[in-house]
Image (spheres, grey):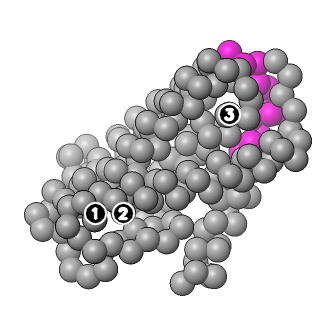
Amino acid sequence: MKSLINIKYILITAVAVFLSFIFHELAHYITGETLGYSMKMTLNSVSLVEGEYLPKWHSYLVSSAGPLFTIASAFAFFYILRKTGNMYWYPFLFFAFCFRLMAMIVSVFNPNDEARISYWLGLGYWILPLMVCFTLLILLIKASKEQGYSLKFNLINYLLATIFTSAIIATDQYLLK
């Protein structure tokens, strides 16, 4: 299959990155609110308005909600892409992998969702993040092979995902706080 990066594809990638951030954080937010906590949300974080999670396992649920949504959406987009063959669904699958890979890398400095959950489960900081990234990478490789996407196409996707992620994080840190 011919994979063409055009303005439509770039805009869809921007939308995929933005919506992935929003819905990932919204999953954290909704879980916290459902458990009875007042939550606050930005483009790249969710936290309690005040206090702490009691009982402690509530924090595990809230931390798990974002990655579970991201993983579920990756599987959904994998099957949509497989069924339709429409390359415009690919950024949604591709970014799910990038999102969790970037979170794993950031965990070197500040344990992110999967790293915290992995630690709480007694697996150390790296087992769960590696399992999630490996699973999403398998989906990505399988989709790329089935759809005939080249390494060059995937590298361009990575570059686009990095640019749009940087824009969202910068916006969150410098314009919205």
Which residue is tagged 2? 29
Which residue is tagged 1? 32
Disc ID at residue 90: 3
Neighbours of disc 3 within 10 Å: few (<14), some (14-19), many (20+)? many
Residue 93 occupies quadrant: top right
Ranked by sequence position, the earlier of labels 3 and 1 is 1
What amino acid type should be assigned to the residue bearing mark 3?
Answer: Tyr
Whether residue 175 is visible, yes or no, is yes
- Nearer to the camera, 156 or 171: 171
Neighbours of disc 2 within 10 Å: few (<14), some (14-19), many (20+)? many
Query: Quick check: 85 above or below 168?
Result: above
**13 on left or right of 36:** right
Query: Quick check: 119 above or below 177?
Result: above
Q: CA distance from mark 2 to mark 1?
A: 5 Å
- The stretch drawn in magenta includes residue 147: yes
Q: CA distance from mark 3 to mark 1?
A: 30 Å
**74 on left or right of 2:** left
The image position of residue 47, as x and y in percent, is 35, 72
Q: Which residues are magenta?
A: 146-158
Ranked by sequence position, the earlier of labels 3 and 2 is 2
The image position of residue 98, as x and y in percent, is 59, 45
> Disc 2 on helix, strand or loop?
helix
> Disc 3 on helix, strand or loop?
helix
Q: CA distance from mark 3 to mark 2?
A: 26 Å
- The stretch drawn in magenta includes residue 16: no
What amino acid type should be assigned to the residue bearing mark 1?
Answer: Gly
